[in-house]
């Protein structure tokens, strides 16, 4: 492969949502690929993901959305309420009227299973229990090694292997993800266990004296809901996090601390949680990176959480990863003597980083909205997100949900072609 031709084959490290999505996006533009995953096929990460219109538009173009639309909980807004149950604000996660799509909360494994089925239908191979080790060499092809000593070759190697990416070590050998000090502690309970009216709006973030508490439906009919909160903890190593997760009774005690200080609906949620069904999510991030591809040949690339981990407040982590994979596949398919790999990657990272920066700013403002009033009073004007005014519902998030990725790629390639 030269710097000015479409890749003959691509090796993808990671069979999570971004890796599997990338495989379909590459197949749709006739670029062969293979996916490698260190875990067994039976592994289930659990939990749900929030898909907003920007990602659903991508998944629709890839042929995924019609297959999953009815397999999750479709909704439009998250409400912020106070402990008296009064609505204080509304955040649009989607809107068919404003953005063309409702938001979709779906179990991660349901989405992965559907993507895997699509890979199988397209004869795209996935090799499980194959742990990527390191890049051996990079020239007109990339040669790489696995932990068992075997090796592989491809025109391009793409790391879709998450925030603790091994592929990223080839670009940044000394970089380690930074712990944010926050851990989400969550569980799933039957909605019927809540002491709440049948028409109580969800998802919802309830602000009360002990802090913010989130409740979000995650199955098709909304009968099961994810409930949880964020708390500050000191960092642990992997064994330490595993030990924390194993201490289910201790986690339950943390959740139920100051039980009577919460509104009754939250008390009913906390009383429904049982030890053995609690999960934790330590929030890690990576600093802003100056490159998402290797220096020189630029045939080793990272994307998604490996390149730009985003805190979960706005639910944009997986959504931005889907934007990454879609735009990259579109650009790789257009490589030519005039449109080189170096130029395409520079355009891709620049465009994507501008959006990531705006998402991070939005996330910070939403996080500030969850602070106690005493802490909010210390912040500068404009630091706290405010909802839509009634005259322009959905308007301030249009930049997020309607990115027009394909149009930007076409416009850039046409401009380069005229140069």
Image (tube, rainbow, N blue to C red):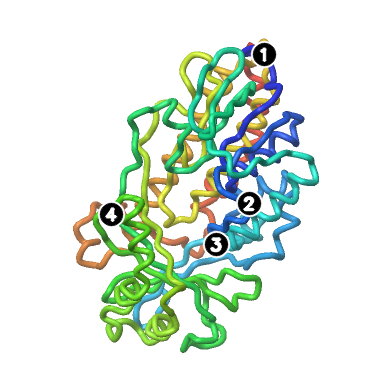
| Residue where numbered disc 3 is placed | 48
Q: Is residue 314 left or right of residue 385?
A: right
Mark 3 or mark 2: which comes first in sequence? Answer: 2
Q: Is residue 130 left or right of residue 213?
A: right
The residue located at (34%, 76%) in the rendering is 249
Across and down, in percent, residue 73 comes to: 62, 68
| Nearer to us in this view, 100 or 295 | 295
Can residue 85 be seen here? The reply is: no
Quarter location, residue 100:
bottom right
Label 1 to label 3: alpha-carbon separation: 45 Å
| Residue where numbered disc 1 is placed | 418
Across and down, in percent, residue 228 comes to: 41, 70
**Does 249 sit above or below residue 166?**
below
Mark closer to the observer (4, 1) = 4
| Residue where numbered disc 4 is placed | 181
Residues marked 1 and 3 touching at CB (< 8 Å): no
Mark 1 or mark 3: which comes first in sequence? Answer: 3
Label 4 to label 2: alpha-carbon separation: 32 Å
The disc label shown at residue 111, or none: none
Mark closer to the observer (1, 3) = 3
| Residue where numbered disc 2 is placed | 41
Q: Quadrant of the N terminus?
A: top right
Across and down, in percent, residue 221 comes to: 65, 75
Q: Around disc 1, counting alpha carbons within 10 Å, would you say few (fewer than 14), some (14 to 19), or many (20 or more)? A: few
Can residue 295 be seen here? The reply is: yes
Residues marked 3 and 2 touching at CB (< 8 Å): no
The residue located at (58%, 65%) in the rendering is 76
Across and down, in percent, residue 6 comes to: 69, 20
Q: Around disc 2, counting alpha carbons within 10 Å, would you say few (fewer than 14), some (14 to 19), or many (20 or more)? A: few
Label 4 to label 1: alpha-carbon separation: 50 Å
């Amino acid at each position: 492969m030269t710097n000015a031709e479409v890749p003959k084959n691509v090796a993808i490290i990671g069979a999570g949502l971004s890796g599997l999505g990338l495989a379909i996006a590459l197949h749709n533009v006739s670029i062969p690929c293979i996916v490698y995953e260190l875990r067994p096929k039976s592994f289930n990460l659990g939990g749900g993901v929030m898909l907003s219109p920007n990602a659903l538009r991508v998944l629709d173009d890839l042929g995924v959305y019609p297959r999953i639309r009815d397999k999750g909980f479709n909704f439009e807004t998250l409400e912020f309420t106070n402990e008296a149950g009064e609505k204080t604000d509304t955040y649009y996660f989607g809107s068919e009227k404003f953005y063309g799509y409702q938001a979709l909360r779906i179990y991660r494994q349901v989405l992965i299973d559907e993507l895997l089925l699509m890979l199988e239908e397209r004869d795209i191979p996935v090799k499980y229990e194959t742990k990527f080790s390191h890049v051996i060499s990079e020239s007109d092809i990339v040669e790489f090694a696995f932990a068992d000593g075997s090796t592989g070759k491809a025109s391009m190697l793409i790391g879709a292997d998450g925030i603790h990416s091994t592929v990223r070590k080839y670009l940044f050998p000394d970089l380690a993800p930074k712990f944010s000090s926050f851990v989400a502690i969550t569980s799933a309970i039957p909605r019927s266990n809540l002491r709440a009216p049948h028409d109580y709006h969800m998802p919802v973030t309830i602000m009360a004296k002990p802090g913010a508490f989130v409740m979000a439906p995650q199955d098709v009919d909304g009968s099961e809901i994810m409930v949880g909160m964020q708390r500050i903890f000191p960092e642990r190593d992997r064994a330490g996090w595993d030990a924390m997760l194993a201490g289910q009774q201790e986690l339950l005690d943390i959740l139920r601390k100051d039980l009577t200080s919460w509104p009754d609906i939250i008390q009913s949620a906390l009383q429904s949680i049982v030890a053995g069904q609690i999960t934790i999510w330590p929030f890690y991030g990576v600093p802003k990176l100056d490159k998402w591809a290797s220096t020189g040949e630029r045939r080793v690339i990272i994307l998604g959480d490996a390149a730009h981990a985003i805190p979960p407040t706005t639910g944009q982590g997986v959504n931005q990863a889907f934007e990454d994979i879609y735009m990259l596949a579109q650009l790789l398919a257009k490589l030519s003597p005039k449109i080189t790999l170096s130029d395409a990657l520079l355009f891709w990272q620049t465009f994507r980083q501008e959006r990531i920066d705006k998402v991070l700013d939005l996330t910070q403002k939403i996080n500030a909205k969850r602070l106690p009033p005493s802490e909010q009073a210390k912040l500068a004007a404009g630091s706290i997100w405010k909802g839509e005014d009634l005259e322009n519902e959905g308007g301030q998030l249009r930049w997020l949900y309607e990115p027009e990725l394909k149009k930007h790629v076409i416009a850039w390639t046409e401009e380069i072609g005229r140069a």
